[in-house]
Image (cartoon, grey):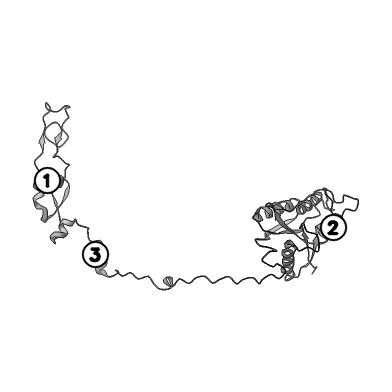
Amino acid sequence: MATIRALVLNCTLKPSPGPSSAEQLGREVLAELATQGVEGEMIRVVDHDVRFGVSTDEGDGDGWPAIRAKLMAAQVLIIATPIWLGQPSSVCKMVLERLDAELSETDAEGRLRTYGKVAGVAVVGNEDGAHHTIGEVQQALNEVGFTIAAAAATYWVGEALHTVATATPAPSPTPPAAPRRPWRSTPRTWPDSSPTSRTRRRTRRVPRSARAANRPHRQVSLPGLPHCWRSPARGSLLDPPQPHRAVSASRSRRATPARPGRTGAGPTRRPPGGCCPRAW
């Protein structure tokens, strides 16, 4: 089986031997790829005399052709860049501009020379903007022919080379166990789950007057009126209703024809306060 090779282009602004957070993150990516049998190499682009341009060779000692030769020999490309002002570094943008020349480079079958190669992104910085940087770099790599695998990006945003030493990274913390919910492990019980309590909940709520008299509440029907509640404790307030009186058409402002099934003409005057005798 052929050996898979990976190339990491470190786009830090610091030349060697200065410390680089992007280099540390890139080496962690190479270490993880090594567990899958992938051989890797890292190049700090700022250490080479890479010229600005959009061709494969700008001439006059351009350092890009040597880097491009290693890129073409690898099957995996990793762009490691810091974040500056929420964007990729200027070195990273220069690398993407040089990769623009691959749009005019094809193989014998008319495909881009980068066809079939996989690319990933590693981003590090002390400020926000990791997702924006990843999206910008991945879109450019995909446009020049690289294949972007699912979740082919990693980033670190926070303290880098200050209070946290990246030269000796701490082991990955073990994720905490999910909190146990003891109230879910036992069946739910309700304090009022007895048959008596269920019956009590179905009992109709009665007014205070009936509860104060300690008598059962009953419902009566009065002639010509809807059902009304009657309490024995306040029986004096529930006198029989007055019979409805028909107002003649001569006394009414507007004559109203008699309704079907009723005798007499004109509207019917109702007791004051509505139809319920409780409001009289």
Placement of 223 over or under 198, stated as above or below = above
Residue 187 place in picture, x, y as percent: 39, 72
| In the image: residue 79, left or right of residue 199 | right
Residue 267 place in picture, x, y as percent: 15, 33
Q: How many angstroms separate mark 3 from mark 1 (CA)? A: 32 Å
Identify which amino acid the numbered label 1 is placed on.
Answer: Pro
Placement of 178 over or under 77, stated as above or below = below
Location of residue 208 by image quarter: bottom left
* On-image quarter of the N terminus: bottom right
Q: Which comes sooner in the sequence, label 3 or label 1?
A: 3
Q: Residue 48 carries which label?
A: 2
Question: What secondary structure is found at the residue carrying circle 1?
Answer: loop
| Residue toward you, 15 or 266 | 15
| Residue toward you, 89 or 147 | 89
Location of residue 231 by image quarter: bottom left
Identify which amino acid the numbered label 3 is placed on.
Answer: Arg
Badge 2 crowding class, 10 Å Cα cut-off, few under 14, some 14 to 19, many 20 or more, is some
Q: Which comes sooner in the sequence, label 2 or label 3?
A: 2
Which residue is under mark 1?
A: 223
Q: How many angstroms separate mark 2 from mark 3 (CA)? A: 87 Å
Q: Residue 278 carries which label?
A: none
Identify which amino acid the numbered label 2 is placed on.
Answer: His
The residue mark sitting in front, 2 or 3, is: 2
Residue drawn 9% across and 36% down? 245
Residue 240 place in picture, x, y as percent: 8, 46
